[in-house]
């Protein structure tokens, strides 16, 4: 992998040219679907390919090497969040991480969970599933596409146990301030859960400074890893609060010592991993985070975020000039994200999605509209392809 990016100023234009080379998908597609499933970078492909060859030719003779990469990923993730290594669990997906919290929490009948309306189903169903334990879910109406902090705070009471929000709205792209919402939860005497899947991989996040209690994020979106490999963060002093619900050999301190059968649960978030893991997926995520961190993805650095916001600002300008209507809140840098929701008046958005696909442009359809989600390696040529594939406004040639 090209290492010259570490020798230049973080915002040097050549960095993004070099990053684009790490994503060969750009040779074929104008790829605007990172909020759904991202392409993996070259290093992930290389590492997974090596794992595949080793699995074919050597079996578990090289398992120690695989395990080492697995644990190095845990360290990379901790560096990404400014957490302790022991606070990072490697889990299959966001839903798994949310369920570890929702099912393991010590609920009592009459407790409640507070969340904004319009959350992605993965951050709704695990909480609704608690109804038979007497737990109420309070969904606070949105103010347009935004989450009103005051309304959320007003919905909390003495029986609120968890406030859960998405860092970035999956359809609208509205980005909230985790630190502000963690304070709302804590002021109400509750814990704070952040679904970080639509922000982690672009925006810096310091879980210490934001005072986040629980966080989950799959790696296959903005972190550009394979599907089936994600992260779970639990503040270390809260580990005793969340009862492990899927205990296995990997949940205990003695781990690989199978002759010592004692329920000695690990003092780490890895206690929730239970058994054999998706090594290929996590090795791929390891490669993806290595790639992104080389180009400035850290808990206290914002160059990838600045690049994504630059590209999305340009995209919004071009869309509006082409007669499209942008619905995402772009009023301030603090609420912008890598997600842009739009439509073209007089045209069916699903049909347009197909039209864009046929022109080599990958987008999604969410909330009844088109959704474009570029990453830092996207450039103006990708935007040109998208705009060229849209219907021309009436009166233009």
Image (cartoon, rainbow, N blue to C red):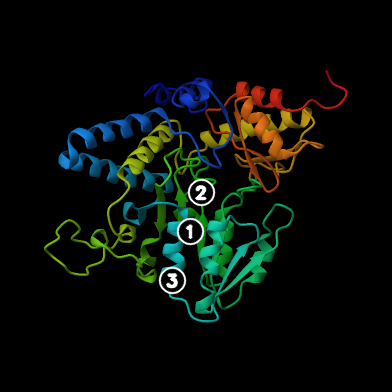
Residue 85's spot in the image, x, y percent? 32, 51
Element marked by disc 2: loop
User: What is the C-alpha distance between the residues marked 2 and 3?
Assistant: 21 Å
Q: What kind of element bears circle 1? A: loop
Frontmost residue, 350 versus 243? 350
Q: Give me the residue at 30% from left, 59% from top.
A: 274
Mark 2 = which residue?
A: 197
Q: Label 3 near label 2: C-beta < 8 Å?
A: no
Residue 205: give x, y in percent of width and height: 49, 47
Q: Residue at x 39, y 51 (%)?
A: 92
Foreground mark, 3 or 1, reads 3
Label annotation for residue 212:
1
Query: In percent of the image, x 42 and y 30: which residue is there?
Result: 41
- Mark nearest the camera among 1 and 2 is 2
Q: Quadrant of the N terminus?
A: top left
Q: Mark 3 or mark 1: which comes first in sequence?
A: 3
Asked if marks 3 and 1 touch (Cβ < 8 Å), the reply is no
Q: Is mark 1 in CB contact (under 8 Å) with mark 2?
A: no
Tell me residue 113's x, y (percent).
56, 70
Residue at image mark 3: 105
- Vertical side of 38 occupied by 207: above or below: below
Question: On the rendered image, what quadrant is the C terminus found in?
Answer: top right
Q: CA distance from mark 1 to mark 2?
A: 15 Å
In the depicted structure, whether residue 1 falls above or below residue 102: above
**Does label 1 or label 2 sit earlier along the sequence?**
2
Left or right of 104 on screen, residue 191: right
Disc 3 on helix, strand or loop?
loop
- Determine if residue 12 is in view: no
Whichever of callouts 2 and 3 sits on the residue coming sooner in the sequence is 3
Residue 117, visible in the rendered structure: yes
Image height check: is 109 above or below 284? below
């Amino acid at each position: 992998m090209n290492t010259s990016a570490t020798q230049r100023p973080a915002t040097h234009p050549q960095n993004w040219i070099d990053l684009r080379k790490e994503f060969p998908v750009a040779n074929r597609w104008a790829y605007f679907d990172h909020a759904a499933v991202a392409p993996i970078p070259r290093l992930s492909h290389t590492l997974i390919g090596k794992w595949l060859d080793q699995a074919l030719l050597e079996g578990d003779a090289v398992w120690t090497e695989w395990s080492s990469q697995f644990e190095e990923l845990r360290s990379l993730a901790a560096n990404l969040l400014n957490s302790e290594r022991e606070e990072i669990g490697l889990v299959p997906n966001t839903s798994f991480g949310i369920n570890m919290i929702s099912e393991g929490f010590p609920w009592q009948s009459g407790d409640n969970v507070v969340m904004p309306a319009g959350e992605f189903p993965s951050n709704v169903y695990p909480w609704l599933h608690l109804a038979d334990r007497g737990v109420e879910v309070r969904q606070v109406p949105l103010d347009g596409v935004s989450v009103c902090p005051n309304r959320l705070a007003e919905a909390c009471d003495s029986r609120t146990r968890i406030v859960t929000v998405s860092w970035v709205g999956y359809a609208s792209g509205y980005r909230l301030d985790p630190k502000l919402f963690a304070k709302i939860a804590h002021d109400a005497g509750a814990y704070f859960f952040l679904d970080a899947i639509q922000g982690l991989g672009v925006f810096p996040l310091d879980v210490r400074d934001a005072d986040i209690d629980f966080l989950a994020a799959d790696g296959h979106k903005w972190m550009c890893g394979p599907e089936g490999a994600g992260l779970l963060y639990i503040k270390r002093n809260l580990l005793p609060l969340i009862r492990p619900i899927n205990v296995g050999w990997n949940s205990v301190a003695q781990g690989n010592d199978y002759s010592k059968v004692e329920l000695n649960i690990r003092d780490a978030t890895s206690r929730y991993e239970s058994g054999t893991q998706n090594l290929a997926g996590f090795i791929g995520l390891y490669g993806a985070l290595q790639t992104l961190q080389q180009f400035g993805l850290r808990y206290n650095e914002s160059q990838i975020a600045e690049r994504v916001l630059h590209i999305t600002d340009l995209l919004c300008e071009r869309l509006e000039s082409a007669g499209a209507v942008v619905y995402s809140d772009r009023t301030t840098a603090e609420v912008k994200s890598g997600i842009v929701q739009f439509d073209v008046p007089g045209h069916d958005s699903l049909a347009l999605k197909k039209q864009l696909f046929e022109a080599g442009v990958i987008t999604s359809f969410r909330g009844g509209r088109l959704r474009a989600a570029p990453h830092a390696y996207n450039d103006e040529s990708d935007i040109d392809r998208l705009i060229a594939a849209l219907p021309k406004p009436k009166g233009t040639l």
